[in-house]
Amino acid sequence: MPLDKKGYTFIEITVVVLLIGMMMALTLPRFRYAVLTDNLKTATRRLVGTIKTIRNEAVREQQGFVLHFDLESNRFWPESSAMTEEERLLSHERASSLPRG
């Protein structure tokens, strides 16, 4: 009666696990870096867009603008010299967030 062996040996499984571990060690740091920098890129684009927008409005309306940065809460918002107090409060409430760090 022949012995029918099906399955993998311990050495084969160990080699596969080591190969998977090596691939993960090489790819996960890059993936983590991409995920972390994505928030930074998004915030940078938002900030640049806000600066361009208020610059264009300042030129078009011939009025001064101020870009406020709240470093404690990591937020920024624009204000115009022509804004009413209610508009300033609304602008502050709609402040954009910056990533921590």
Image (tube, rainbow, N blue to C red):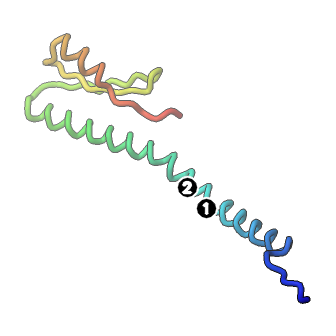
The amino acid type of the residue labelled 1 equals Thr
Q: Quadrant of residue 16?
A: bottom right
Left or right: where does residue 31 sit relative to residue 64? right
Disc on res. 31: 2
Residue name at image x 23 percent, y 22 percent: 79
Residue name at image x 29 percent, y 24 percent: 94
Disc on res. 84: none
Left or right: where does residue 9 sit relative to residue 52? right
Q: Residue furthest bottom?
A: 2
Q: Nearer the viewer, residue 95 or 24?
A: 24
In the figure, 76 relative to 83: above or below? below
The amino acid type of the residue labelled 2 equals Phe
> How many other residues sit within 10 Å of disc 2, few (<14), some (14-19) or many (≥20)?
few
> How many other residues sit within 10 Å of disc 1, few (<14), some (14-19) or many (≥20)?
few
Spatial separation of the CA atoms under disc 1 and disc 2:
6 Å
Disc on res. 27: 1
